[in-house]
Image (spheres, rainbow, N blue to C red):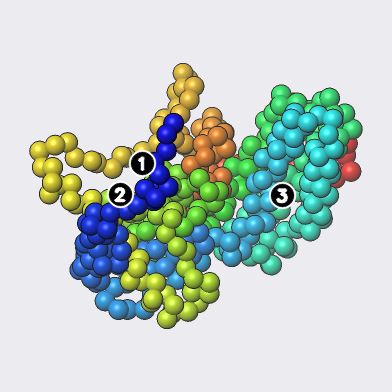
Amino acid sequence: MNQPPASLQSHQSPELLRLFETYTGGPQGIGANLAALTGAATAGDPLIVATSADMVLFPGNGRDPEVQGFRLSTRGFKELAGISHHGPAVASILKMRLVDPEGPLWRTEAGRLLAATRIAREANSVALWRDLIAVPAYRGREQKIAELVHYSCVLTERYLERVLAQPTLFTPEDMRTHYLEGTGSAVGATVPMNAVMIATFFLVGMDISHRVIGWLERHAIDWSRAMALVVGRQGRPTAGVTWTTNSVAAMILGASRHTLSLDRLFIAPHAGEFPPGAANDIAALRAYETPMRQLWAHTHAVSELGALMYEGYPRYEPSSTVRPVLDADTRAVAEMPAVAGPDDWRALNTRLRVVLEDPRQLLSGCVTDYAVEQLQAHGNDPARVTVPGLDGTAYPPLPDDAT
């Protein structure tokens, strides 16, 4: 195919370029000026900005912002996440074996997981959870959590030792039967590893949501005027980009008791996180407020142009965040299903599958929305909430030297 001369390939018309820049191509464009004007008009409204680790409330009218950390610095988050990830870690090693059965990598990684699990088991104790990690939302459950952690570690050790000794047994069906679903007796499972994953995901979601809900409720926010932004990366690069897949959005909506309308909550994965150290620097946070208000206001203002320009045509209406309900004939879902109660294991296990298969999902957000729902139904009191896979589930003290 003939190409235009090199002198023409990069040519830009300065006259047409100027027209482009008049609206959108720079800080003095019409779009940018609309953002500044509408941002100033909402300067007195409460703005909530959530990053991957912190939530900031800008009360408005120049008042100092307040910060609530909620994820990576949370006590117990990483410790429980390590247990939550036992299942996906074993499945990842199985996938390595299926891809390269004669290669050394799957054995090496199985040995590495086995060693890390043994060390974790030896460090686990009731005192660790009660006196050192000491999460207020877990108060009264420390014994049960220690028992769950011990069980998860021993069962994982036994299963890895078994498949390392007899690699031909390491198949998807074997993993599901003797490990994930716990219906087989080869390694002494009495509680499915699926229940362990749900319980630990729920505990983390319950703790974070309990603190965020309490923090937001203490500020008596006028949700009819509130503006909310979830910015930056949430988990894996493709995750948390929609209302139904973003656990932070679920917390904010839950704190508002769903009185915050969806058209006032925006998810902006490409917007910048706080500058390093800004969470502890009022001046830096104040500097962050204006661009965040302008981002929210411009997004909202552009959406309002539709009614100005196209009155009489069907309008856009944000979709509901109501979850699909499973029935006996359900074979696939496009969203995580509704959970009927703490014993609805078909829905809970389906959620485990969905958060792995749907790249929009946050793995750790598997049941956060359900935890929010339960907290709101019980006055934000974790002690009154039933933790699926923990409360009412007996974790036997498996001997760690069993084979």
Residue plotted at (76% across, 56% down): 124
User: Which one is in front in this view, the residue at disc 3 or the one at disc 1?
Assistant: 1
Sequence-wise first label, 1 or 2: 2
Residue plotted at (28% across, 54% down): 13
Residue designated by label 3: 149
Residue 378 image point, x, y percent: 43, 52
Q: Quadrant of residue 30?
A: bottom left
The residue sitting at the top extreme is 329
Nearer-the-camera pick, 96 or 118: 96
User: Is 245 positioned to the left or the right of 185 in the image?
Assistant: left
Up the image or down, 165 lies above or below 68; here it is above
Residue 28 image point, x, y percent: 26, 67
Name the residue type under label 3: Val
Name the residue type under label 2: Leu
Residue 302 image point, x, y percent: 23, 53
Badge 1: how crowded within 10 Å, few (<14), some, or many (20+)?
some
Cα distance between the residues tagged 3 and 2: 38 Å
User: Is 397 positioned to the left or the right of 283 in the image?
Assistant: right
Nearer-the-camera pick, 335 or 323: 335
Numbered mark located on residue 73 in the image: none
Q: Are marks 1 and 2 in contact (CB under 8 Å)?
A: yes
Name the residue type under label 1: Thr
User: Is 19 positioned to the left or the right of 355 in the image?
Assistant: left
Cα distance between the residues tagged 1 and 2: 9 Å
User: Which one is in front in this view, the residue at disc 3 or the one at disc 2?
Assistant: 2
Element carrying mark 1 = loop
Sequence-wise first label, 3 or 1: 3
Can you see residue 388?
Answer: yes
Residue designated by label 1: 321
Numbered mark located on residue 262 in the image: 2
Which quadrant: the C terminus?
top right
